[in-house]
Image (spheres, grey):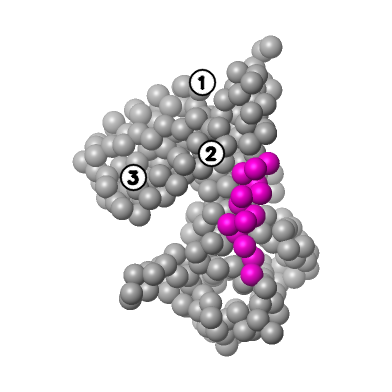
Amino acid sequence: MAARIIDGKALAAEIRNALFSRVARLTAAGHQPGLAVILMGDDPASAVYVRNKALACEQIGIRSWIDRLSDTTGELELLARINKLNADQNVHGILVQTPLPKHIGTPKVLESIAFEKDVDGLHATNAGLTLMGTPYFRSCTPYGIMKMLESIDAPIEGRHAVVLGRSNMVGKPMAMLLLAANATVTIAHSKTRELANIAREADILVAAVGRLHLVTADMVKPGAIVIDVGTNRTPDGKLAGDVDFEHVKQVAGWISPVPGGVGPMTIAMLLTNTVEAAERRAHTKPH
């Protein structure tokens, strides 16, 4: 029996609909949420991501700004732009689209964003709070995956979750959120021995490596939940994930597709974090 599909696109639409009324209430009270995005260079994929984020903001009433910078912009100028946004009371969330040009120090840039406006959840303070189990902002993709698991009433407590990938953006915070939900968590990566055997032990398998069709059907426990974070291009130019979807879906119990799975959820959780930032600011302002 083929796996059931976790429809991230439909779930993201539900989340955006719920956010719409929260944004409307904030705006009516004079606290319209605002998201500022900095885009350096002319990378086509980054431009598409930023455009999609701006459109999603517009659809639910969040004000958005896109600050487009040349890929030759110096690090000091970029940091100055971020400092200006940190001080702007109309900006509740700041996002610097990655990857950045090689002459820019990405960690330094991310650390320059005020953690109260770090709606991507990548600042060291937010990463540390996630590690402690008290996140201020959750990293958007792992946050979206947890919502996907929640949407299918997936049992997490006591289950074995395997995360393939150890990036600061997905792999590490994903492991921490699963651990906080009382899963037993294994992180595997490019240096892991017996990767297929470890993956087969997973009740919940999250693939976030960035390698086309890395996860094959023989690596999946029958009935497992498989979440595909990968975004890769096939030889014919189509978008595909880290999971060999057509074959794995014959083994798994639940599976997320690419496209239409994790991607829309990442944007939905970015909007959620931005609205939460505006709500926090509204509650601390004098009336």
- Point out the residue furthest to the bottom here: 218
Residues in magenta, as a range? 5-18
Question: Which quarter of the rendering shows the C terminus?
Answer: top right
Query: Residue visible at 64% across and 28% down?
Result: 24
Marks 3, 1: nearer the viewer: 1
Across and down, in percent, residue 54 comes to 45, 40
Q: Nearer the viewer, mark 2 or mark 3?
A: 2
Which residue is situated farthest in the top direction here?
Answer: 287
* Residue at left offset 38%, top offset 50%: 48
Left or right of residue 284: residue 71? left
**Label at residue 105:** 3
Determine the secondary structure under disc 2. helix
Q: Residue at x 67, y 13 (%)?
A: 286
Query: Which of the two residues, 18 or 97, is positioned nearer the viewer here?
Result: 18
Q: Which residue is mark 1?
A: 89
Residue 20: give x, y in percent of width and height.
63, 36
Using the rendered view, name the quadrant where residue 280 is placed.
Answer: top right
Residue at image mark 2: 59
Few, some or many residues within 10 Å of mark 2 (<14, 14–19, 20+) = few
Q: Nearer the viewer, residue 190 or 207?
A: 207
The alpha-carbon separation of the residues under discs 3 and 1 comes to 26 Å
Q: Nearer the viewer, mark 1 or mark 2?
A: 2
Crowding at dot 3, Cα within 10 Å, few <14 / some 14-19 / many 20+, comes out as few
Horizontal and vertical percent for residue 16? 62, 44
Q: Is residue 9 left or right of residue 161?
A: left
Instruction: Tell me, yes or no, whether the highlighted magenta stretch contains residue 7.
Output: yes
